[in-house]
Image: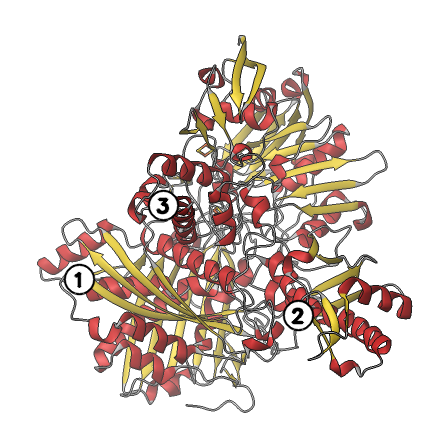
Amino acid sequence: MADHILDFDVNGENRRLLVTDQRTLLEVLREDLVLTGTKHGCDVGECGACTVLVDDRPVLSCLVIARQVEGSSVRTVEGLAIDGAPDLLQEAFAELGAAQCGYCTPGMLLSARALLDDNPEPTTDEIREGLAGNLCRCTGYIKIFEAVELAASRDHDR
Amino acid sequence: MSGAFSVVGERLPRVDAMDQTMGKTQYVDDMTLPGMLVGRHLTSIHAHARILSIDTSRAEALVGVHAVITGADLPITYGILPISQDEHALAVGRVRYVGEPVAAVAAINPEIAEQALALIDVSYEPLDEVVTLEQALETDHPMLHGDGLGQNVHRSAALEFGDVEEGFARADYVREDVFFFGGNTHAALETHVALASYSQTGKLTLWSSTQVPHYVHRTLEKVLELPAGRIRVIATAIGGGFGGKTDPFSHELTAAKLSMVTGRPVKINLSREEVFYAHRGRHPVLMWVKTGFENNGQITSMHFKTFLDGGAYSSYGVASLYYTGALQTTTYRIPNYRFEGLRVFTNKPPCGPKRGHGTPQPRFGLECHLDKAAADLGLDPVTIRQVNAVEPFSTTVNHLRITSCALVECIDKVVEASDFTVKRGRLPSGRGVGLAVGAYMSGAGLPIYFNDMPQSEVQIKIDRGGGVTVYSMATDIGQGSTTMLATVVAEALGLEPRDINMVIADTDLTPVDLGSYSSRVTFMAGNAAVTAGAKIRSRVVQAVADELGVDPAQVVTKGGRVGVSGDLDRCVTWAEAVRLAIAATGPLVESGGYTAPKLAGTFRGAGVGISPAYSYSACVVEVDCAADTGLVKVERVWLAHDIGRALNPLLTEGQVEGGVYMGLGEALYEEHTFRGGLHRGPSLLDYKIPTALDMPPVETFLVESDDPEGPLGAKEVGQGPLLPVIPAVANAIHDALGVRIDEVPITPQKIVAALRNVSRGRPGRIGPETIPDFEFSRLTRVEPPEGFVTP
Ligand code: FES
Ligand code: FES
């Protein structure tokens, strides 16, 4: 196992660290950088809990070898707020009860963020599609859909 | 009535909602301690085998490995129920399912831990595997618990209330049906994680994603032989439970032991695959029901038999068994009732409690059976349920006390909202609607181990600056119990839920609550919090009344102020009021406890099913089925739930929606099945839980029956709403296609097979035909309770 220097941006901050060939982005985020907001429910790409944004595109961080994000910019749930102000999605999820146990929430928020960045006024079906890779075992997704709709409409209004 | 409340009944977010969405909530796996080691389990590759030897020397010699332990290091048995202490943290002498933990290592990182597992040499002698119910009832296989050959019956039960034969004799119509409910599992998104730290002072601390810190505490005390006072169990934030984190688990004990051996903190994070093996999920249940009816649909008698495939260990099994027979009577007035059931051991992961614990399976059978009977009697599904519906404030033939009950109202709500009566039988082919109902306990009436202490205690401490801190051991598994407690205390003190500091689920800091299971927390911890809050309130009110020179009855607590009702100027702030009270009467610390009323009859099994109150649900499901592929699309679900009082309608609705979701998964997709002793797909890819694409719209109706004993009138919602969903789906599919799938999950293959049967002139039914020919012995005859009125 060779070590490599990984140089990338996380939530707007430059990070440089030594990683092995096999280290995943999930491990780098949670263990090396102690950004434990990102969760994991399977470690093999089946649950969506580990979703983060790499250059604004949602990825399953458990499936990404850390070296692949060299030079990229990564956004995790800790970086969703801008200047300390929560993302509209974070507020809407909280307000509408879209988080029960909260374990799927960080991944869900990042998938939703990517969806809204791409399509600011999604239909419910588009929201379903956009979140289809993120499993939630608690909510039945309904309040999650509502929260994404609320955030989208607030974004539209401002 | 809800006008009388200020925060109760409001659609407020969880008190920790912003922490959750900002990624700040700490689950066990988010914790790291200095010097922490990684623990891993070596698990059995055999479904049934004798362990001839275990050689750990090569693993111990690996650089970076700090300890290797086996069953010999943890020889004391345990189990959640005092009557069935049959588990070892690590197998001793024998393994009974694939995936059973055999040895554990602690190493400096996961890679070395994995390497160490590969260096442990276990020599097994495979034994004859018992994997099906039928095999378990044969006499020529080894007994899983015990020596020699014989039947693997864990426990059987046979109870009769009233006179079942007499009831059948006076029936106009008698019907028998056989059903099967396949096993399934919780699949909480967070896997099970435990972190243990043993200090040089001889104190053990365990952080765990457990629903039951109190029972884990007791288990650690027993197995590790440490005094309870030297063990601290903390349930951190929990990423979902659904009953799957309600047993004490191997990894909690091995993490603790490894920390004691190494003197360093040890964390064990079960892999997703290991969680499928740890299981404790829904029992597969084969069942048979025979019911007598009068021509108007009234039930005269019922005989229910259940056969539970329990897996390798007892877990909650004795309770699960009785639950398959206990709650049929809580929805329908059944004048004569016989229940016979048995649970067998098989070489598969142990089954246990999953949302609805032992009651969704018979509920599925019963509700489908009723629809079939109604059709034969020329009645519609609504009428047959209305005719038999249990009355509020009545007693069932099997000695369950019913208090508030809005079953009929729930039925009316969903029937009306869904246009059920108009749609049923009249939708285009492939579309259909189905109705079903259910009831669930607001907490098990008895604690798991016999004692007369309160089942829940809550303390409140007020700071001199007015800060309110509530202490409770209730675990928030996502259902919102922490917010519920903050809400009832805020209500009493005239504050907002977010003003309340919550200290929860820590055996050193918080007084006992038995845990989040049996839908007990709102009712029990909620009542304890109401009591404690009222005590604080009355002391504060008295002090302010004295200060203002008014009668305490005139003083109200509202909006952060304490003052004279109707005279807004005569008031003090909450913080001032608190200081007045402390000056007048000393430290402002109070507690409340809740003990359920003594409701259990004296017969064996009477402790299961009793509850201080029952919630009621009714559900209509509309489906669209493709006859060629058998694919079922659920179009919409209407669910009415008698919650007593919705302390927080937003969170309550969330529980209903989550229950509907889980019910749909069980009805249509989820299957915990085995090939021999091998799990067919221990992953989230193979075990199909519904995604965002599968979830239909749900219309929820909260019905408030104001329970006389519930906290501010509230009852449970975490489990009950799941119950009617599954049979409502089955009944809707029948309405859509005319076929009966008497077996859960209702997969496309079964639907296609049933339709093929029809096209070949055979009955359009898929499901079991017969039940094992098992002679239930020792039928206990129990007289109906005093004052039981035969309908
Ligand atoms: S942890 Fe489940 S998809 Fe990455
Ligand atoms: S809120 Fe628990 S998994 Fe989504």
Closest to the observer, B191 or B591? B591
Q: Which residue lies under the disc numbered 2?
A: B527
Residue B770, can we see it? no
- Dot 3 lies on which element? loop
- Dot 2 lies on which element? helix
Q: Look at the numbered discs 2 and 3 and tell me whether their residues touch, using CB distance below 8 Å.
A: no
Q: Quadrant of the C terminus of chain B?
A: bottom left
In the image, residue B296 lies at what x, y percent? 28, 88
> In the image as oriented, which residue stretches furthest toward the left?
B760
N-terminal of the pair, mark 1 or mark 2, is 2
Q: Look at 31% across and 41% down and name the residue there.
A: A129
**Which label belongs to residue B737?**
1
Closest to the observer, B293 or B734? B734
Discs 1 and 3 lie in a common subunit: yes
- Dot 1 lies on which element? helix
Which amino acid, mark 1?
Answer: Leu
Q: Quadrant of the N terminus of chain B?
A: bottom right
